[in-house]
């Protein structure tokens, strides 16, 4: 290994460990509300499928969680939350590595990595139990090995691309969007005879190996149900999300909210560097094919998230945000090739911290301005403005306090009906802390174990 390669990997390790320390500090310490609590509960019960349909199973994430469950360090729920911290740090480091290899210098790569790491959605989902950052880490690894293939024309990088995308599909169905781009890319390479049919066969095999956790669930579901169409619908849309996935209409409300999501994540003048990156992409991309893949992914992930209608669709912009940050890094390199003013460079890095100040001030400002968050009801021990507008969850003990207060309030042999937001802190408190053992928890949420 050359001294240059050693330097790159040292920088990669430094970025990873700094990001990891940052997200570990930000990580929630215990049980959580809603989907995050559900994931904690599923991992506790070794449940890799869930009951919301195959598209929402995320088996790779839950297999990792089951392994983490057996590490005898700290609280179980905190360990599960830390999976996202590690995945988030990997995602930030992988983005840095891609741009460091591509552009050949550290500054644009560091800028893009910090910008992405401080995005509201990135930061939030690196601090709670969620599947998203595991996918993003794999997605950015895909783009890195694809770049290395284009740069070096070594087939081993195509093999890694296939393996990583298979793993990504097993983590989240977002992987199927990138899968389409990679298949087209591979078909073009094959048509041009740049890769042989044997190589394509190895890629297919490695993809199948990577996606095995998801394929296992599909095959098991097919055998148990006997219905091919129902199994495929579950694998593509889950039990209840076909309409949201296939939605092709836009309302004024939807467009307004989505615009707010994007602006809140990129509440810094540095976002304008994305436009410079788009302009410069044709000049600095390693090949036309790589440029087309990046642009196709940018458009596809944006359109998928923008017309999606689920309440937590803000999370579905994450792949788009990662691509925007890549363009910000490219734009920084191109723009400052024409300007040697160091003060301007320093100003750009100062601007990367602006979102942190905005996140800190947003809850109080939103409350005083009378801004109403789109939540159905107020939940005890949860300040909705802080929960949704601040990405860090360092002192998020509300779910545990809620469960403790409930069990201290109700009588023995009481029956509690809980919705999908509150049921999991109650169940986790019962099973992990032994509280409320005589109380029966009833919920219509399908992932509650009988």
Image (cartoon, grey):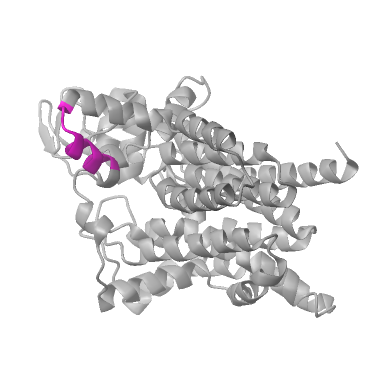
**Furthest-right residue in view?**
3
Question: Which region of the structure is painted magenta?
Answer: 225-235
Judge whether residue 172 is colored magenta.
no
Q: Is residue 240 in sight in this rendering?
A: yes
Number of numbered discs: 0
Q: Nearer the viewer, residue 202 or 33?
A: 202
Name the image quarter holding the C terminus: top left
Q: Position of residue 93 (x, y in %)?
A: 65, 48
Tell me where residue 343 sits by quadrant.
Answer: bottom right
Q: Nearer the viewer, residue 218 or 136?
A: 218
The residue at 46%/34% (across/down) is 78
Judge whether 35 appears above or below 331 on screen. above
Q: Nearer the viewer, residue 60 or 72?
A: 60
The residue at 65%/61% (across/down) is 112
Tell me where residue 247 sits by quadrant.
Answer: bottom left
Q: Nearer the viewer, residue 349 or 340?
A: 340
Residue 411 relative to residue 174: left or right: left
Judge whether 263 appears above or below 398 on screen. below
Residue 58 relative to residue 52: left or right: right
Q: Is residue 446 in sight in this rendering?
A: no
Name the image quarter holding the N terminus: top right
The residue at 43%/62% (across/down) is 300
Q: Position of residue 270 (x, y in %)?
A: 62, 73
Q: Main secondary structure of the magenta part?
A: helix
Q: Position of residue 341 (x, y in %)?
A: 83, 79
Tell me where residue 447 sits by quadrant.
Answer: top left
């Amino acid at each position: 290994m050359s001294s240059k390669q050693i330097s790159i990997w040292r920088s990669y390790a430094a970025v990873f460990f700094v990001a990891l320390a940052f997200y570990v500090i930000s990580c929630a310490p215990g049980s959580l509300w809603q989907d995050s609590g559900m994931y904690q509960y599923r991992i506790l019960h070794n449940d890799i499928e869930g009951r919301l349909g195959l598209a929402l199973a995320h088996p790779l994430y839950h297999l990792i969680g089951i392994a983490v469950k057996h590490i005898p360090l700290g609280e179980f729920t905190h360990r599960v939350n830390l999976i996202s911290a590690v995945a988030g740090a990997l995602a930030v480091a992988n983005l840095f590595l891609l741009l460091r290899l591509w552009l050949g210098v550290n500054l644009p790569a560091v800028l893009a990595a910090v910008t992405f790491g401080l995005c509201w959605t990135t930061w939030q989902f690196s601090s709670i139990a969620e599947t998203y950052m595991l996918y993003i880490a794999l997605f950015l690894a895909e783009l890195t090995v694809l770049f290395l293939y284009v740069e070096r024309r070594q087939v081993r990088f195509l093999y890694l691309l296939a393996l990583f995308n298979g793993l990504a599909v097993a983590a989240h169905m977002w992987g199927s969007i990138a899968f389409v781009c990679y298949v087209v890319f591979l078909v073009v390479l094959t048509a041009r005879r740049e890769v042989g049919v044997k190589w394509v066969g190895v890629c297919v095999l490695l993809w199948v190996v990577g996606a095995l956790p998801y394929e296992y669930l599909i095959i098991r579901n097919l055998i148990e149900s006997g219905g091919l169409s129902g199994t495929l619908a579950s694998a593509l849309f889950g039990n209840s999300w076909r309409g949201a996935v296939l939605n092709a209409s836009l309302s004024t409300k939807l467009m307004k909210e989505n615009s707010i999501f994007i602006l809140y994540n990129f509440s810094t003048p540095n976002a304008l560097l994305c436009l410079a990156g788009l302009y410069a992409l044709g000049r600095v991309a390693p090949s036309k094919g790589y440029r087309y893949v990046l642009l196709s992914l940018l458009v596809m992930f944006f359109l998928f998230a923008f017309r999606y209608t689920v309440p937590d669709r803000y999370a579905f912009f994450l792949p788009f945000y990662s691509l925007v940050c890549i363009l910000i890094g490219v734009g920084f390199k191109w723009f400052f090739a024409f300007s040697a003013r160091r003060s301007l460079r320093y100003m750009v890095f100062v601007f990367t911290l602006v979102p942190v100040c905005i996140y800190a001030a947003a809850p109080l400002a939103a409350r005083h301005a009378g801004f109403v968050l789109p939540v159905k009801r107020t939940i005890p021990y949860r300040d909705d403005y802080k929960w949704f507008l601040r990405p860090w969850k360092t002192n998020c003990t509300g779910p545990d306090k809620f469960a403790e207060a409930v069990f201290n309030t109700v009588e023995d042999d009481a029956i509690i009906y809980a919705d999908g937001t509150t049921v999991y802190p109650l169940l986790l408190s019962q099973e992990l802390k032994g509280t409320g053992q005589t109380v029966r928890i009833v919920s219509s949420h399908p992932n509650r174990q009988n």
